[in-house]
Image (cartoon, helix red, strand yellow):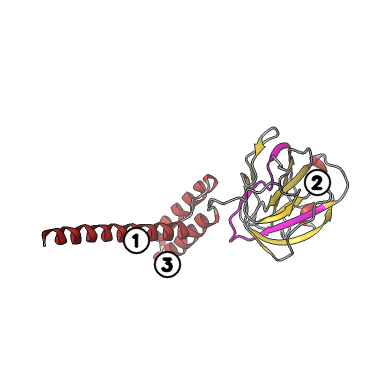
Amino acid sequence: MYGRLRYCVRFQSHYDWRRRSAHGECQMRMRDTFIKPMHREGIRFVAAFAAATLLLFLIWEPLGWIGVGLTVWCYYFFRDPERVTPARPGLVVSPADGVVSLIEPAVPPAELGMADTPLTRVSVFMSVFNCHVNRSPVAGEVVAVAYRPGKFFNASLDKASVDNERNGLRIRMADGSDLAVVQIAGLVARRIVCFVKPGDRLGRGERFGLIRFGSRLDVYLPPGVVPLVEIGQTMVAGESVIAELAPAGQAEA
């Protein structure tokens, strides 16, 4: 009898431990789903929204609750979740969350010093609800970074690539070929942030910048590379594949 009782106690303890463990894992999954890491660029904005919210509560409580909603939205805008980048060599991944808005031949920005031959340009439009952290499409060395001021047309328009404020990166891969990725400010976004400089090395899917409050990213593929996406397709930065540079086994870097 004593042995059976001891076995029951041990079994119950093990069951309770597994139940608590499963409950804890469930809580962690829920937390990770709704509470994302925030990029450091967003700290001062969230702090400003929170301070304004406190003042609004002092003025009139309903205004304060509106401020709470705006503060949560600001935090959500600057979220910076981890991404799982595909490991297969030769893949080009999306530099941004959003929707493919344009696929067309276009000459890369002159300030990047690339040839004036048209290349296939894939444009990813980010709404104000997308994560705005930008990631490198490929691995390689940054050989040029060029900022150019401009206008602030709707980033989904074709002319935004030419007329809007922009910041371009020219990335040289291990085989010597170059790829360009261009951050374009939109109707709302008026602040492009870039963390890298010429000589820096980027891994595929590595963060290199962000654009505040709605924008677009253009990727200029090397000659002969065909995009694997279609207009209207949803992209996830650092994860979604937009093209393949070479057959499997030929590493890019």
**Mark 2 or 3: the one toward you:** 2
Question: Residues at badges 2 and 3 in contact (C-beta under 8 Å)?
Answer: no
Q: Amino acid at mark 1?
A: His
Quadrant position of the C terminus in the picture? top right
Q: Quadrant of residue 193?
A: top right
Is residue 46 toward the left or the right of residue 98 in the image? left
Would residue 117 be seen by someone viewing this image from the given angle? Answer: yes
Q: Amino acid at mark 3?
A: Pro
Foreground residue among 145 and 88: 88
Query: Where are the magenta residues, as a range?
Result: 120-148
Residue position marked by numbered label 3 in the rendering: 62
Q: Earlier along the polypeptide chain: callout 1 or callout 2?
A: 1
Foreground residue among 14 and 53: 14
Q: CA distance from mark 2 to mark 3?
A: 48 Å
Number of disc labels: 3
Residue position marked by numbered label 1 in the rendering: 23
Residue 131: say if magenta. yes
Secondary element type, mark 1: helix
Q: Residue furthest left?
A: 1
Q: Is residue 168 above or below residue 57?
A: above
Q: CA distance from mark 3 to mark 1?
A: 36 Å
Residue 140: say if magenta. yes
Secondary element type, mark 3: helix
Foreground residue among 33 and 190: 33
Residue 127 % position (x, y) = 63, 61
Which residue is found at the position 58% from the left and 56% from the top? Answer: 131
**Tag shown at residue 109:** 2
**Mark 3 or 1: the one toward you:** 1
Within 10 Å of disc 3 (Cα), the crowding (few <14, some 14-19, many 20+) is few
